[in-house]
Amino acid sequence: MRIALFVIATGDYIKYIYPLVDTVKDFFLTDHKVDIFVFTDQQEVPRGTIRIYCKHRPWPYPTLYRYKYIHEARHLYQGYDCYYYCDADMLFKDKVGDEVLGELVGTRHPGFFNQEKTFFPYETNKLSTAYVKDGDGMFYYAGGFNGGRRYLEMAKMLDYMVELDLYRDVIACWHDESHINRYFISNPPDVVLSPSYCYPETKKEIIDYRLQNIKGKLIALNKGK
């Protein structure tokens, strides 16, 4: 299969790309052909990756506009069999294989794994397109790794939702993550991954307890160290 992997790395985030790309080559869907698309404002990207220019914007727009960037450049990667997004500040640590293939793929958030859904930080502002009413939702998904065959269809809708919010002068509390959680409630992923695929490098004691039987395959780096 032909796999497209998207990574956004503007500004200082470009420093994370080189080690991430090395681990992609070692561990990510190695039985398939994987092309890595790097959205960046920097001139240099790792050899073998495909650079797509992306203007650097102040926070929170680098994350809020994630799906806009991917949707607007769709002509560059039409025809792939499956699409995935991965945060730049992550590293693959173990083999990630065909278990991640699906129509829509979501990853359960390590911070809210095995918690009652009353604790999930869904968007509560009714003016936002990401709004989730009480009682809705089964899981809380991380924004750091997701994908699937229908990923470009999802990116188009999430771009529209974010733009509609901005038109109303609204920003969802957890930005792109709020929007993907809203989308997954209406369009449940057929592949739901454990926090193995967004595993925190440094864990608080309570999170460590919840994840004690889970092995990290894709590590979310501690940027504060």
Image: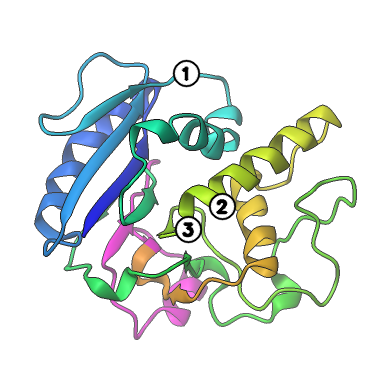
Residue at the front extreme of this rendering? 79
Q: Amino acid at mark 3?
A: Arg
Quarter of the picture holding the N terminus: bottom left
Q: Are marks 1 and 2 in contact (CB under 8 Å)?
A: no
Q: Are marks 2 and 3 in contact (CB under 8 Å)?
A: yes
Q: Give the labeled residue for mark 1.
A: 56
Earlier along the polypeptide chain: callout 1 or callout 2? 1
Identified at 30% across, 16% down, the residue is: 42
Q: Residue 73, located in which quarter of the rendered image?
A: top left
Q: Amino acid at mark 2?
A: Met
Quarter of the picture holding the C terminus: top left
- Near-viewer residue (30 or 62): 30
Secondary element type, mark 3: loop
**Residue 202 within the segment the image draws in magenta:** yes
List x then y, in percent, for residue 53: 37, 19
Identified at 53% across, 67% down, the residue is: 111
- Residues shaded magenta: 198-225
Q: Give the labeled residue for mark 2.
A: 154
**Image side of residue 110 versus residue 125, left or right:** left
Q: Amino acid at mark 1?
A: His
Q: Give the labeled residue for mark 3.
A: 150
